[in-house]
Amino acid sequence: MQNATLLAAVDLGSNSFRLEIGRFEHGHIQRVEYLKETVRQGNGLDEDRNLTPEAMQRGWDCLARFAERLTDFPRAQVRAVATQTLRDARNREIFLQRAIQILGYPIEVISGPEEARLIYQGVSRMLPQSDERRLVVDIGGRSTELILGQGFTAHTVASFRVGSVAWSSRYFDHGNFTPQAFHTAEIAAKAVLDEALVSYHPSTWEVAYGSSGTVGAVGDILAAAGYLPAGTITREGLDWLQERLLRAQNADRVRLDGLKDERRAVIGGGLSVLRALFDLLDIRQMQVAQGALRQGALYDLIDREQPETDLRSSTVRALMERFAVDMPQAERVERVACGLFAQAAPNASAHAQRKLGWAARLHEIGCRISHSYSHRHGAYILDNTDVAGFSQPELHRLGLLVLGHRGKVHKLETDLDDAIFALQLLCLRVAVALCHARREPQVQGLQLEVLGNGFLLQVPPGWAERYPQSVHLLHDEVQAWQKTPWTLTLDMP
């Protein structure tokens, strides 16, 4: 990446949407612009976990304003991520379809652990270099992330369904603050967070940091009240703040220096969750960190630029080891599939080829469960796993390729409208066929082309006579594509 390159991250949080624009300079990112709007989509989920039309419209309106600022940004320099509310929303595809059109860039719904990893990435990049063992806490609108890490590496990540928006609406009816409401909210938060005590015991970390949202708001209030040192949260400070909220009796009546208007409605829920964490994890004091999810997303854009620094590549290797994948066979299929793809689509993005390579490496991930239906089991695993570096849509896309690498092609007909996906699937299926003997296949002289809505695979003279089983499998592949919008033609002299 060249110095002075502009990068942008969009964070679609449960309480606020944020846009961070930074300039890459010698391995670091300097902020250029920061926009934040309180959207409160977390309050817009109905009893059936559907986003209300009003909540969706608030999100679309905000993204339209962000899109204007992002005009002319290359796609590779923008990353948009969505968190707990859109993880929960049953009708999220309705929101996302229009949101992507409005923003002009893909929006990734990331898992809780992936959100936690990116938060730690953002926090650690904004802290001085240190070997200290860190606990990082991020209390968002509908989820709370906890991370243990050292340096730039997150070692333990977790996400819990408890947050400032959810707890405020659930336990502080109409914004009313009472001792009983705070007591009930803290007990409920501890019930959700209790399992964190095993992995996040005080012996596992040395310094506690809080990121963004609630922690930032509480830090600002305590600093304005004269609690020193500024940027530090203590138990005494939390007790003082709760007493001030109880005196006010209602969120609308709270008047505190340092408390922003958009944070007023959710401060009660956020404070109760923070107090629960202080008690559970025996936190004496917490430092307010500057980094957050959006900074982590920006630095992740840099890491994704090269295969050797792309965390997703190491995640794929870890999945292969966990599910005892035949490594040599996976690598053979990857080489053949990516070689065919490069022939047929020389101008395709390196990212598209990398995704095909990952699918090839994982195509037998389901064999540990059942060989006969390994493709189905593999797709299920990828759709239901939380792994570092990948968003849920990315894992689903890999799962579709794994599902389609054998059996009928037309089961994926709705996805075959995407020409790149169709080509990736064909290359993977042909590679699996050519590597059927689990040894290095002879592919020299094979040529694959895309001709309109069809694929042409040319075979060199004499090849068919030398490899009759491969020819038989390729003829089966021709038949498999006949019931799809695409055709496969073999040219065998």
Image: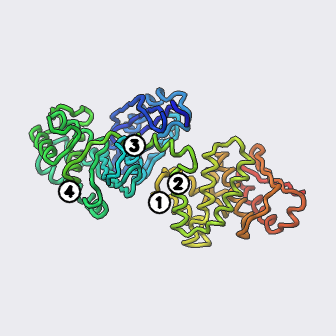
Q: Is 378 displayed left or right of 332 in the figure?
A: left
Residue 408 position in % (x across, y down): 67, 61
Mark 1–mark 4 Cα distance, whole angstroms, equals 31 Å
Q: Residues within 10 Å of mark 1 (few under 14, many from 20)?
A: few
Label whose residue precedes the other's in the sequence (2 or 4): 4
Label whose residue precedes the other's in the sequence (4 or 3): 3
Q: Nearer the viewer, mark 1 or mark 3?
A: 3
Q: Nearer the viewer, residue 91 or 4?
A: 4
Q: Quadrant of residue 317?
A: bottom right
Mark 1–mark 3 Cα distance, whole angstroms, equals 27 Å
Q: Are marks 3 and 2 in contact (CB under 8 Å)?
A: no
Q: Residue at x 16, y 45 (%)?
A: 238
Which amino acid type corresponds to the residue marked 3 in the rendered image? Arg
Mark 2–mark 4 Cα distance, whole angstroms, equals 37 Å
Label 2 secondary element? helix
Q: Which residue corresponds to mark 4?
A: 282
Residue 373 position in % (x across, y down): 60, 69
Q: Nearer the viewer, mark 1 or mark 4?
A: 4
Q: Which residue corresponds to mark 1?
A: 385
Q: Nearer the viewer, mark 4 or mark 3?
A: 3
Label whose residue precedes the other's in the sequence (1 or 4): 4
Q: Are marks 1 and 2 in contact (CB under 8 Å)?
A: yes
Which amino acid type corresponds to the residue marked 4 in the rendered image? Asp
Label whose residue precedes the other's in the sequence (3 or 2): 3
Q: Which residue corresponds to mark 3?
A: 125
Label whose residue precedes the other's in the sequence (1 or 2): 1
Mark 4–mark 3 Cα distance, whole angstroms, equals 26 Å
Q: Residues within 10 Å of mark 4 (few under 14, many from 20)?
A: few
